[in-house]
Amino acid sequence: MTQAPIHIDLQKDKGLRLDWANGESTFLPIDYLRKMSPSADSKAMRDELDSNPLAILPSGNSQPLTALGAELVGNYAIRISFSDGHTAGIYSWEYLRTLDGISHG
């Protein structure tokens, strides 16, 4: 199990920065966090797009996506509220480390 970060900085219009005890840092852009939300509906949408590249995406808001806030979930995760109304995803520390690996190669 991945340990909690020692510092969390949510830059609402940019992204989430996590500093880990081993000296590493993770930065994940807001739009990437929203796209990779671990919620069931977001996972279903990603699966649909993987299996059907012609799938129609729901129309988005014309405003830039931002984070409205975040709250800790126990000592294992964070929940981020997005400006498009999405609040369902619970991002475990382990999942965020995985996303960092994916987003950088």
Image (cartoon, grey):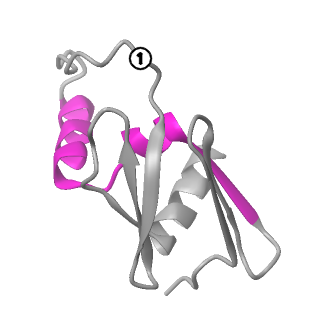
Q: Is residue 69 left or right of residue 26?
A: left
Q: Position of residue 84 (x, y in %)?
A: 31, 32
Instruction: Answer above or below: position of 74 versus 66.
Output: below
Which quarter of the rendering shows the C terminus? top right
The answer to whether residue 105 is seen in the rendering is no
Indicate the quadrant where residue 100 lies: bottom right
**In which quadrant of the rendered view does residue 50 lie?**
top left
In this orientation, which residue lies closer to the viewer: 2 or 62?
62
User: Who's the residue at 82% across and 74% down the image?
Assistant: 23
- Which span is picked out in magenta? 25-51
One can see residue 43 in this view: yes
Magenta run includes residue 56: no
- Which residue, given by chain and number where applicable, does mark 1 sit on? 63
- Kind of residue sitting beneath label 1: Gln
The residue under the point 57% across, 81% down is 4
Give left or right: position of 80 versus 24.
left
Residue farthest to the right?
Answer: 23
Q: Principal SS element in the magenta part?
A: helix
Helix, strand or loop at label 1? It is loop
> How far across and how far down the image is residue 10, in percent?
60, 53
- Reply above or below: 40 against 86: below
